[in-house]
Amino acid sequence: MSRTVRVKPAYELTPGRRIVIEIEQKSIAIFNIQGRLYAIEDSCPHHGASLWNGKLDGCVVQCPAHGLWFDLATGLMRPGGMMQVATFPVRQAEDELEIDLPDPR
């Protein structure tokens, strides 16, 4: 089960930008890569470093703490690593962003 949460005005997230939001004590990084939105948990599974300000290479973000790379679409470490960061469906709805989060129950 999942639930939809509306956040931040979408106009703040133009192509090439990224933001971090807090939802229920969880940090989520949202990226706009050439008009496509990606949302991931903003915590590297290696040691918890923030990913939102990591170097981007296309749709892959590098953890600034230890250099690990994560695919924004799948959350999987690249190339072929065993770690994964949580991803969340995100879309623009009118002037806000909608993120689908797992139901806490």
Image (tube, rainbow, N blue to C red):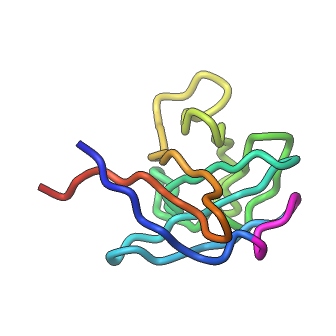
Q: Is residue 87 left or right of residue 91?
A: left
Image quadrant where residue 69 sits: top right
User: Relative to 23, does residue 99 appear above or below in the rendering?
Assistant: above
Please, which residue is most extreme toward the front here? 94
Q: Is residue 61 left or right of residue 48?
A: right
Quadrant placement of the N terminus:
top left
Residue 21 in magenta? no
- Residue drawn at the location 85% of the way across and 40% of the way down: 58
The residues colored magenta run 11-16
Query: What residue is drawn where x is 76% and y is 45%?
Result: 36
Task: Give the x, y percent position of residue 4.
Answer: 39, 57
Q: Residue furthest top?
A: 80
**Viewer-side residue, 38 vs 50:** 38
Residue 63, percent across and down? 66, 55
> Tag count in the figure?
0
Residue 81 position in % (x across, y down): 55, 28
Magenta highlight: main SS: loop
Tell which residue pokes out farthest to the left in this image: 105
Image position, residue 60 (x, y; %): 74, 41
Front-most of 62 and 88? 88
Residue 27 sits above or below residue 87 on the image: below
Q: Quadrant of the C terminus?
A: bottom left
Residue drawn at point x = 34 percent, y = 77 percent: 25
Name which residue lies at 67% across and 70% down.
95
